[in-house]
Amino acid sequence: MRITISQIKEMKEKGEKITMLTAYDYATARIVDEVGIPMILVGDSLGMVVLGYESTIPVTIAEMLHHTKAVVRGTKNALIVGDMPFMTYHTSVDEALRNAARFIQEAGAQAIKLEGGVTVADKVKRIVECGIPVMGHLGLTPQSINQLGGYKVQGRTSQAAAKLLADAKALEEAGAFAVVLETVPAPLATLISQKIAIPTIGIGAGAGCDGQVQVIHDILGLSNRAPKHAKQYAKLTDIIKNAVSEYYSEVKAGSFPTDKQSFSMDESILAELKAK
Ligand code: KIV
């Protein structure tokens, strides 16, 4: 049985920190699930860390569904949250609902995430009414990068901070089960976490959030970016480079494969063939 949104909400009530991590493929999702991480986000960050796009804006719903399906196949326990890509939930409540449903019905996710507060509250409300759990996303919302003018800290002015709090309240009111706070001053994120009853999941928003989310490539040392909010727990790029170099050298030198990696056959069949 997978973790439910009720269990995630209970974790906040009990003061238990919530851990969330992204995953985009079967093999990685299996590892994350085996560790016991309760929530996995199939983030549209896959556009940058997996597909090599400049931003999350080019990511399509077909790409998101493809990767969400792989993550679902690789997991048994985690709650899987599918990230709705740019312009798949903005034009109308109906379109938002139909696209959200695809993540649940076609890809097998248990919840969806979308960016924005007051402006998307009507969509959140309808999606939740139709039985689909929604996670909000406020602060640095990468799909609005052109409007925000870069990957900058959000909510530093009194007006921007008040707007963030109002957006968080609007999402709670609309029925969201949790909200991501990205690149927000830590004291503001702490205050928002105290003012709303649903869990806040921070990324670059300090330790006062109810939970934390990170992009797995950043914490494993696999991405070519090093955001200030990410800590590298491993240097997988170096490990992979060493392994690939060793393989390259051994193939060139003829020392791979050996008998250990090869298959034998009946000598008489070979002799027969040679005699022809
Ligand atoms: O796409 C993503 O990975 C995200 C997280 C950074 C929260 O939205």
Image (cartoon, helix red, strand yellow):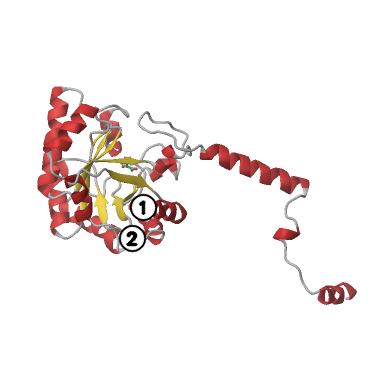
What crowding class fits label 1: few (fewer than 14 Cα within 10 Å), some (14-19), or many (20 or more)? few
Question: Residue 57 in the image: x percent, y percent?
Answer: 34, 41
Question: Residue 92 in the image: x percent, y percent?
Answer: 17, 50
What crowding class fits label 2: few (fewer than 14 Cα within 10 Å), some (14-19), or many (20 or more)? many
Q: Is residue 86 left or right of residue 232?
A: left
Question: Residue 122 in the image: x percent, y percent?
Answer: 12, 48
- Amino acid under disc 2: Ala
Q: Residue at x 41, y 43 (%)?
A: 216
Q: Is residue 247 left or right of residue 183?
A: right
Q: Quadrant of ligand 1?
A: top left
Question: Residue 267 in the image: x percent, y percent?
Answer: 83, 73
Instruction: Give the residue furthest to the left.
Output: 173
Q: Is mark 1 within 8 Å of ligand 1?
A: no
Q: Which of the 4 quarters of the picture holds residue 260?
A: bottom right
Residue 36 is tagged as 1
Of the numbered discs 2 and 1, the one sitting upstream in the chain is 1
Residue 114 is tagged as none
The secondary element bearing badge 2 is classed as: loop
Q: Is residue 55 left or right of residue 156?
A: right
Quadrant where the image shows the N terminus: bottom left
Residue 229 shows in this picture: yes
Q: Which residue is mark 2?
A: 107
Quadrant where the image shows the C terminus: bottom right
- Amino acid under disc 1: Gly
